[in-house]
Image (cartoon, grey):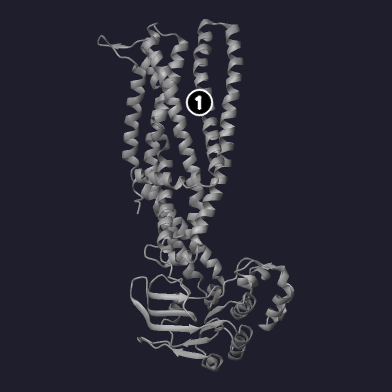
Amino acid sequence: MTSPLSLRAGLRSALRLAVPYFRSDQRWIGLGLLASLIGAQLVAVGAAVAENYWRNAFFQTLQDKNWPGFIEQFWVYALIAVFHICGAVYQRYLGQWLTIRWRSWMTAHYLDRWLHGSTHYRATMAAGAVDNPDQRIAEDVRSYISLTLELLVGLIGAIARLTSFVAILWALSSSIPFSIFGVTIPGYLVWAALIYAVAGSAVTHWIGRRLIGIDFEQERREADFRFALVRLRENSEAVALLHGEDFEKRGLAQRFQAIVDNWFRLMKLQQLIGLFSESYKRYSLYFPYFVMAPLFFGGTMQLGSFMQSGSAFNEVRNSFSYFINAYLKLAELAAVTHRLSQFAEVMERSKAADAEVCSPDGAALDASEIVVKTAAGAPIIAVDGVRIESGTSLLITGPSGTGKTSFIRALAGIWPFVDGKVSTATRRPLVLPQRPYLPLGTLRAALSYPEAPDGSNAARMVAALKDVGLDDFVSQLDQSDRWDVRLSEGEKQRLSIARALLYRPDLLVLDEATSSLDKASEISLHRLLRTRLSAATIVAVSHQDALHPVYDRVTVLERSSRPSLI
């Protein structure tokens, strides 16, 4: 895995992350916008070159006290300024256009991979699981693209400026030779700028080499704090009932203090880099004039050439100093790129953990020699074999802690730590967990999940709600609300049963999906499912002994046992 401390490795990873977009079906639009963006940068460079020549003519009119020439140079600058303005404005505009297109594609790409099958679930269970995937998709993608474009366009601009102004500076150095101890130094201004910039770059890297790791850690701590705040919001009722506000406050304070501690480390290092880079930038503004002062005061250099040489020197020095000026952003890009590369690696490993799926003859579900393990590799439950014929039902019971839920996850194909083979002939499975998930939006959308709402089955929706005892909500189907907060646990479980009636799966798995209901309601809903979904294969987990007569077969899991399900 890429080290967050390696700037070179981070930049290589940044290039690898960019390649898929520029090879996608949007590559021509993306490449066109990138070319236009670079073109706008080159227009700005061309305007800077023109301004450099203008400085020679402008200051020469001052030395000659040439009033007509002085006025003429103002009109010349007005034309040059048009290109400066257009280059700056359209560089920003085209950059924003490319950023949002690239971000849209990259976000969709990561969402496709993250939500492929059960990758999003397995990636949180696997060893080396990534923290805060929401931040990596929402924030890191945006930062990566913005920083990449800014640094790439800046680098191309620096190369273009360097190429243009080195030629100018070399020509000026040749026209006004500089000798020391009787030896004439060709291109002495170019060599002075190069030595100045290389020395500054070396010192900057020596000071800031630890910045990437600190940037990476700051992003992680910020994301942890946001996650804790969101988790508190999602569980505010439980916290209020338990009067756990003081505990939560201490936990949030500790997470925020971790941000503060790392922030001070970041401040101190950025302070050192800032002191050096600002000193370097400020002193270098007039450094070339001190270098050339003997020539000017000696009468061999005119004022126009003196000002043009100083301007060209600073342009060359800026181009050579690109690394210094961009160091903080390069460090940030390396840290962000590492987070995205790490995320991609974990998703790839989790995707490779898909269970083998085939079609067993005459059975809806067939599992043999199954050993379900923890993420650390410790066995949770071992099952010699389970074969469930199509259209039959099985009830699994047993004490808490025997691995019933883990076994259900293995059968559903979402638990990655399983030895053995799970085969299924089902094409439309549905698993109802103990804590139902309700998406944001209308009650109709929550009832239709995982499918999109369909207006043609409105009558079936109304009937399903009435069948499960949610008659009072029939008139609120199109009302948007936080249904996951508004409904009680029992109402949410009733809604999930109604969802199953609408979905009509060929394999239905219920993991204590009615445990929040009273005994009579629980039995009634299980009978309803057996009646309405008579062709479906149903596997249920429950502690309720009264459900035994509802199902065709019952299996009891015991602690430290290796049951054989037949």
| Above or below 528: residue 184 | above
Who is closer to the viewer here, 291 or 525? 525
Q: Is residue 259 visible?
A: no
Tell me the quarter of the image containing the C terminus. bottom left
Q: Which residue is mark 1?
A: 45
Q: Residue at x 49, y 18 (%)?
A: 52
What amino acid does circle 1 point to?
A: Val
Who is closer to the viewer here, 113 or 520? 113
Q: Residue at x 51, y 47 (%)?
A: 24
Query: Residue 547, located in which quarter of the rendered image?
Result: bottom right
Mark 1 lies on a secondary structure that is helix
Residue 318 image offset from top left, x and y in percent? 42, 28
Q: Residue at x 40, y 26 (%)?
A: 317
Q: Is residue 471 left or right of residue 173?
A: right
| Above or below 370: residue 21 | above
Q: Is residue 196 left or right of residue 470?
A: left
Who is closer to the viewer here, 11 or 232? 11
Q: Is residue 438 visible?
A: yes
Residue 77 image offset from top left, x and y in percent? 58, 18
Residue lying furthest left in this view? 181
Query: Residue 391, located in which quarter of the rendered image?
Result: bottom right
Residue 167 image offset from top left, x and y in percent? 41, 18
Residue 266 image offset from top left, x and y in percent? 39, 47
| Above or below 479: residue 112 | above
Structural crowding at the residue carrying mark 1, measured as other residues with C-alpha within 10 Å and reported as few (<14), some (14–19) or many (≥20): many
